[in-house]
Amino acid sequence: MTTPPRHPPPSMLRQLLAHEASGGLILIASAVVALVVANSSAASLYETVLAGKFAGLSVLHWINDALMALFFVMVGLEIKRELLDGQLSTWSHRILPGIAAVGGMIAPALVYLAFNSSAASARGWAIPSATDIAFSLGVLALLGSRVPVQIKVFLTALAIIDDLGAIVIIALFYGHDLAPMMLLLAAITFAALLALNRVGVLRLVFYIPLGLLLWFFVLKSGIHATIAGVLFAITIPLERSPGHPDDAHSPLHRMEHALHPYVAFLILPVFGFANAGVSLTGLGLADLMKPVTLGCLLGLFVGKQIGVFGFTFLAVKFGVARKPAGTSWVQLYGIALLCGIGFTMSLFIGLLAFGEAGPLQDQTKIGVLAGSVISALAGWAVLRFGTVSFDKALKSQG
């Protein structure tokens, strides 16, 4: 009897597109549920549970500092894999999404600062600079086969580089009251992890305890604890598989595949539920006109499309990069709109900028939620209907 051929597991990029899309839909649902709960009779219970203390930290702190550290481990693993052995492994593949990501960080920050000149509110300048890959791919999932895979790969690559930029911004601009001794201990632990990688240790059991130590020292150092997740991910060994991206068994691949379902289907929805809840009682036009709200909303909706699409268009027109094969400018504009879905990363940076409570935090949530929803609807509409109109116009001309 003939043994059926063995099919290798799908590559991480293809799983990323599938899992992040479905995970993004769950993330959307968690945000909606949070808004409903925060504006219902259960609002006081919602706030009490999140404020409850466990081992010296509130439940909200555990979610934002511990669970999200695992999210950043996942982000770090994806960045390392894509840069060394994936869709971003060559400069020709990196350059266009890289340019688009840079534009998508600069323009929203400038739009935000145009409305926020005071020192207190200007601290949130990076809030609209982030793109939520899970949420944006969740919207793409609703479009099914109407969107070519090249567009999905471009958005994924852009968002991964965007995440890298967000990590750098968090590390450089959102630390506080640095503790030199803890920083030293974190540096020693990180060096030990790098040494394990250097001498060729491949068993994850030797890395994980040091990773937990690194998280604790970074938590106490004044740098946000989630940065420990990225530093830990950098040290995980990667065995390159050129030409065979589906045949991957290195420690990095194993950890990435093990973490991904928990991050996509548990950690991000929990984060969304814990942080998207904002009371809309008495919300009026005046609240939407407040500087932080306007900065976040217009930074995401206007700034992102100007930065992403504008930089992409100029890069292609000046011959610096090539437009993804089989894509139209209408589709790329739709992607630029979807990049205005900040949600997870924008809310996270808002927490670092303004703390977990207070009027500026409420304005941030309203602005991020409004900007993300408008961007999602506009991006979906352009990709759903604009592409059809564009194709019909081409056929009528030729």
Image (tube, rainbow, N blue to C red):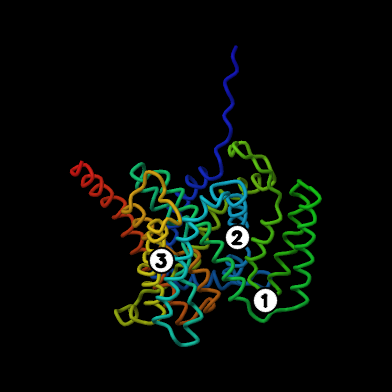
Give above or below for 237 relative to 296. Answer: above
- Category of crowding for the residue at label 1, using alpha-carbon neighbours closer than 10 angstroms: few (below 14), some (14–19), many (at least 20): some
Q: CA distance from mark 3 to mark 1?
A: 32 Å
**At 58% across and 58% down in the image, what residue appears?**
71
From the top left corner, tell me how far across and down residue 59 is, in percent. Answer: 59, 68
Q: Residue at x 54, y 70 (%)?
A: 50
Residue on which disc 3 sits: 307
Q: Nearer the viewer, mark 3 or mark 1?
A: 3
Nearer mark to the viewer, of 3 and 2: 3
Up/down of 246 relative to 166, above or below: above
Residue at the disc numbered 1: 222
Residue occupied by mark 2: 72
> CA separation, marks 3 and 2?
25 Å
Seen as rendered, the residue at the extreme left is 396
Q: Amino acid at mark 3?
A: Gly
- The spot of residue 56 in percent (x, y) is 67, 73
Instruction: Tell me where residue 60 appears, x and y as whole percent.
Output: 57, 69
Whether residue 37 is situated above or below residue 205 in the rendered picture: below
Instruction: Give, as a three-letter code, the residue at label 2.
Output: Phe
Residue 160 visible in image: yes
Q: CA distance from mark 2 to mark 1?
A: 17 Å
Rendered location of residue 307, percent (x, y)? 41, 66
* Residue in the foreground of this view, choosing between 183 and 210: 183
Question: Label 1's element?
Answer: loop
Q: Is residue 13 above or below residue 69?
A: above
Instruction: Give the quadrant of the N terminus.
Output: top right
The crowding category of the residue bearing disc 2, from other C-alpha atoms within 10 Å (few below 14, some 14 to 19, many at least 20), is many
